[in-house]
Image: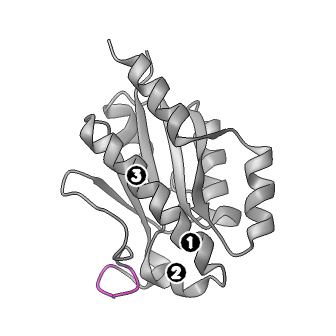
Amino acid sequence: MSKTALLIIDMQKACKEATSCKASFEKAVEYINEVSQYFRKHGLPVVIIQDVEAGGAETEGFQCVDEIAVSGNDIFVHKTYNNAFWKTELDAVLRSKGINCLIISGFAAEYCVLFTYNGAVERGYSTFLLQNGIAGFDDDEIKRIHMLRSVISYDALAYFLKEAKP
């Protein structure tokens, strides 16, 4: 049986400021919040990944955007590289919780989301992008990434997670 976690990548204030695609960023926030609340309600891990290049933990830009729902039970991972698995504790944390399936959401589709997706696949995780749950610098590039990777909708995710319960 698979155990699934939601990764929320770089939904930070500095990242929102950096993108010219504010509408897609705000749309992604809505989907991420809906799915993260579902995960929390069902006791499934939500991992908030923050890029230290957004200013470091002491700065305002490093913080998650105010619109993102965050819980005290969420797992926080700080990263330096595009791939959230590279030189972080992410893989060890997920494996310690028996996670073998990942839903990836966040910013930026062309960089950190894509590199983390590939890093998850390389490590043997069943990996999906959250449909409408990724943002980036270019809306056309986001669409291309959706076409070239496994994507799951909120409705399909809720169905499969409900079916996976013992």
In the rendered structure, are the residues bearing label 1 and label 2 in contact, judged by CB atoms less than 8 Å apart?
Answer: yes
Mark 1 = which residue? 25
**Which residue is identified by label 2?**
16
Q: In this view, does 145 lie to the left or right of 104?
A: right
* Relative vertical location of residue 96 with respect to residue 145 in this rendering, above or below: above
Q: In this view, does 117 lie above or below 51?
A: above
Q: Residue at x 55, y 32 (%)?
A: 156
| Position in image of residue 58 (x %, y %) | 29, 85
The disc, 1 or 2, on the residue closer to the chain's N-terminal end is 2
Amino acid identity at mark 3 = Glu
Residue interval drawn in magenta: 57-62
Q: Name the residue under label 3.
A: 34
Image point (53%, 54%), residue name: 105
Q: Nearer the viewer, mark 1 or mark 2?
A: 1
Quarter that holds the C terminus: top left
Residue 66 part of the magenta segment: no
Earlier along the polypeptide chain: callout 3 or callout 1?
1
- Horizontally, residue 57 falls left or right of residue 79, namely left
Count of labels shown? 3
SS for dot 1: helix
Estimate how packed mark 1 is, as few (under 14), some (14 to 19) or many (20 or more) residues with alpha carbons within 10 Å: many
Q: Residues within 10 Å of mark 2 (few under 14, many from 20)?
A: many
